Image (cartoon, rainbow, N blue to C red):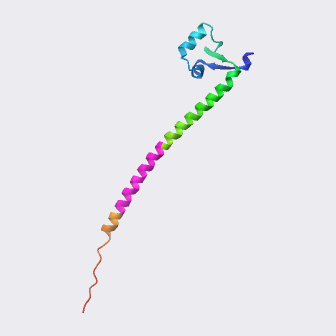
Amino acid sequence: MSATDGVWLSITDYSRYKNVSISTIRRHIKTNILKHKEENGKYLIYVPSSDRLKIREEEEVLKIKLETELLRSQIRQLREENNELKMLVELYERQNNKSMRSDAPPEIPELHYE
């Protein structure tokens, strides 16, 4: 299998992918346990193509989880806004009902002259 059959991940991405601490990955790089290369002063770790599908699936799951959290947050915010608006409508309706009762002049009784 050549290096083109896999993918090169940054230490951070590899750490998330394998759920291993960055310091452990750096130790493995220093002892040549991991296949790695240095590019622009940064280490990249090789992941074979057999793992690429798993990485893509995990990325997709992570994206879905993040989107779900965002949507939950938006729903929570919309519920709060909706509750505030309901309260304002209630207050407005109470004031409107009070003002309709107090603004209307009292009924004038009909006078009958004989």
Give the residue displayed 43% in from the left and 52% down from the top: 85
The image quarter in which residue 91 lies: bottom left
Where's residue 1, x and y in %?
75, 16
Nearer to the camera, 19 or 100: 19
Give the residue displayed 62% in from the left and 32% down from the top: 60
Where's residue 73, x and y in %?
49, 39
Magenta range: 76-96
Q: Main secondary structure of the magenta part?
A: helix
Residue 95 magenta-highlighted:
yes
- Outermost residue, bottom side: 114
Please tell me whether residue 36 is drawn above or below residue 71 in the rendered image: above
Nearer to the camera, 92 or 21: 21
Please tell me whether residue 93 is drawn above or below residue 77 in the rendered image: below
Where's residue 30, x and y in %?
59, 8
Where's residue 16, x and y in %?
57, 22
Name the side, left or right, on which 49 lies relative to 43: right
Give the residue displayed 50% in from the left and 42% down from the top: 74
The image quarter in which residue 28 lies: top right
